Image: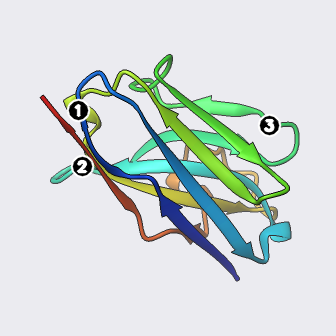
Amino acid sequence: QVQLMESGGGLVQAGGSLRLSCVASGGTLSTNAMGWFRQAPGKDREFVAGIRWSGGHTSYGDSVKGRFTISRDSAKKTVYLQMNSLETEDTAVYYCAARPSSTVVAVAREDAYSYWGQGTQVTVSV
C-alpha cells in the first residue's frame, strides 16, 4: 500500500508562486509514475502534470504548460510541483497520485492512478 502526503498549499496573490510537495511512503517500488491533479469547486478533476520515476519524463496539462514544473527526488520519494505566474483560475484542491507499475495507462488519465493523497488547497487571489 502506498501512502501520499501533500504539502505546500496556501493563499497567494495572482502572479505569485508556490511549490507543492508530495512524499510517498509504503510500497513505492510498485509505482512507476506520479501525477498532480486539481479540482476546483463545481468542476471535474483535471490533470496538471505527471512524471515517471525512471528517466523523469514529464507531461503537462495545456492550462499549466510554461508556468508549472514537475520534478522528483527519487531518493526522498518526493515529487514537487513548482507553480509560477499563478492565476485565479488555478485555485483548486491539488492532489498527488501514484500510478502502479502494472499499468500502462497514460499519466494524464485519472484512471491510471491507484493511490491518492488527501489534497492541499491552493487559493490564488486577485
Depth order, front residue of 62/12: 12
Residue drawn 87% across the image and 37% down it: 55
Depth order, front residue of 121/56: 121
Left or right: 88, with 25 as reference point = left
Residue 40, labelled with which disc? 2
- List the residue tagged with mark 3: 56
3D distance between C-alphas at marks 2 and 1: 9 Å
Tally of numbered discs: 3
**For the residues bearing labels 3 and 1, Cβ distance under 8 angstroms:** no
Q: Amino acid at mark 1?
A: Glu
- List the residue tagged with mark 1: 89
Mark closer to the chain start, 3 or 2: 2
Q: Quadrant of the N terminus?
A: bottom right
**For the residues bearing labels 3 and 2, Cβ distance under 8 angstroms:** no
Q: Amino acid at mark 3?
A: Gly
Query: Is 66 situated above or below 100?
Result: above
As helix, strand or loop, the secondary structure at mark 1 comes to: helix
Mark closer to the chain start, 3 or 1: 3
Query: Is 87 situated above or below 52?
Result: above
At which x and y percent is residue 74?
82, 52
3D distance between C-alphas at marks 3 and 2: 28 Å
